[in-house]
């Protein structure tokens, strides 16, 4: 890609010439090249630097200011990819990438992504692709069994744990204040989570209209676990002040230290005050698949919802988040709409 001119003069792909079979054959050839590229990358990635080698703005400056008007052959695109894009990539698939959380895209998952992209389905509802709906249902049921949740739990795929937790907050609101769906949030709902919780919880509360000032950061103990005694006290104080505690989010595997909140004690308080309990197990939940780590989800069976990310420790590329709830009726009530079309 030349910054100003190359993209305008490149050969038109076969599809633009109206030859579908040639277009498919172009794809076949390019697809083999792409798979070869990926295999080469996977065999070399451990030799690459983990961090991107570019300065801020370097890739931006190397890209044309206006969008290409013509397509380019795939080998030219791949050359640009190597020359311009790769140096600007931080290698999340690197065996020495230890930032944030371990991210382990695997080769079967890469191939799965290719097949899914080829079908380009949209799982709006069963009829838009029964395969999507039924595969999702069955695969999430397998994952549910792996982490030891009972068959009371219903699973659904979301893009991220951030979206999952935001939807959990909406469910919590729907449970205690069903008017809010039509009238909007009242400003007396209060959500509790620890001072170690992932920022997505607070962002979810902001997005849903709970309001940042109604998010209570419960202090944690010396091992970064939510203090259940502090939670109980804060809930009581808020109730006395006329507030309405509606949701508590416990974390199983905090982002900074993988600390595990005392879910059984938190569940006692949630039950006592009629609050929705969401378990954010985005990071560490997959560890519960191992019998020796199953205990990390002790008490979670009493929660209303739980999320864990297949795209963290389950060998799945970003993004695949598994959201489970024991109250699919409330999830449905919170979000169902029948659109005009
Ligand atoms: C505990 C926890 N919750 C939520 C998230 C957000 O996950 P996602 O990027 O899927 O939104 C993370 C990500 O690191 C996390 O560690």
Image (spheres, rainbow, N blue to C red):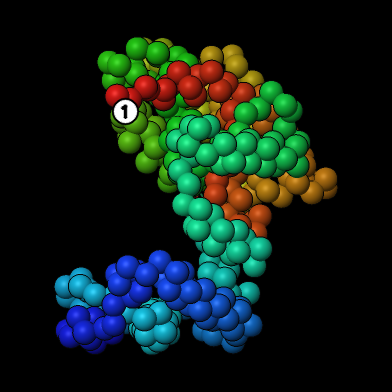
| Image coordinates for residue 145, horizontal then vertical, percent | 75, 37
Q: Residue at x 41, y 25 (%)?
A: 335
Q: Is residue 90 visible?
A: no
**Neighbourhood count class around disc 1 (C-alpha, 10 Å): few under 14, some 14–19, many 20 upward:** few
Coordinates of residue 10 in the picture (x, y in percent): 26, 83
Does dot 1 land on a helix, a strand or a loop?
Answer: loop
Q: Quadrant of the C terminus?
A: top left
Quarter of image, res 239: top left
Quick one: 75 or 211, which is closer to the camera? 75
Q: Is residue 7 above or below residue 207?
A: below
**Res. 141 visible in picture:** yes
Residue 314 position, x and y percent, is: 66, 55
Residue 264 figure quarter: top right
Residue at figure coordinates x 37%, y 41% from the top left: 203
- Residue at numbered disc 1: 341
Rendered position, 81 above or below 276: below
């Amino acid at each position: 890609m030349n910054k100003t001119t190359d993209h305008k003069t490149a050969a038109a792909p076969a599809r633009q010439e109206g030859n579908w079979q040639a277009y498919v054959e172009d794809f076949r050839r390019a697809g083999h090249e792409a798979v070869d590229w990926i295999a080469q990358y996977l065999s070399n990635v451990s030799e690459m630097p983990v961090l991107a080698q570019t300065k801020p703005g370097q890739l931006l400056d190397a890209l044309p200011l206006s969008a290409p008007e013509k397509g380019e052959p795939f080998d030219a695109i791949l050359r640009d990819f190597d020359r311009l894009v790769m140096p600007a990539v931080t290698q999340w698939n690197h065996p020495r990438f230890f930032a944030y959380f371990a991210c382990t895209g695997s080769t079967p998952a890469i191939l799965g992504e290719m097949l899914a992209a080829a079908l380009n389905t949209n799982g709006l509802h069963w009829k838009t692709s029964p395969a999507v709906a039924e595969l999702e249902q069955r695969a999430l049921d397998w994952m549910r069994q792996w982490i030891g949740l009972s068959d009371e739990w219903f699973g659904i795929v979301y893009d991220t744990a951030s979206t999952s937790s935001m939807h959990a907050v909406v469910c919590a609101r729907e449970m205690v204040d069903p008017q809010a769906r039509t009238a909007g949030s009242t400003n007396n709902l209060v959500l509790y989570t620890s001072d170690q919780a992932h920022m997505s919880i607070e962002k979810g509360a902001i997005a849903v209209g709970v309001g940042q000032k109604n998010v209570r950061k419960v202090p944690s103990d010396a091992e970064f676990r939510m203090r259940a005694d502090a939670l109980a006290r804060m809930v009581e104080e808020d109730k006395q002040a006329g507030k309405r505690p509606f949701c508590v989010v416990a974390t199983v595997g905090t982002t900074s230290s993988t600390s595990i909140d005392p879910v059984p004690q938190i569940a006692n308080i949630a039950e006592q005050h009629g609050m929705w309990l969401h378990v954010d197990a985005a990071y560490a939940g997959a560890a519960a698949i191992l019998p020796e780590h199953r205990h990390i989800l002790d008490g979670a069976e009493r929660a209303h919802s739980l999320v864990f990310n297949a795209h963290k420790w389950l060998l799945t590329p970003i993004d695949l988040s598994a959201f489970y709830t024991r109250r699919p009726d409330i999830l449905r009530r919170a979000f169902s709409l029948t659109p005009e079309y």
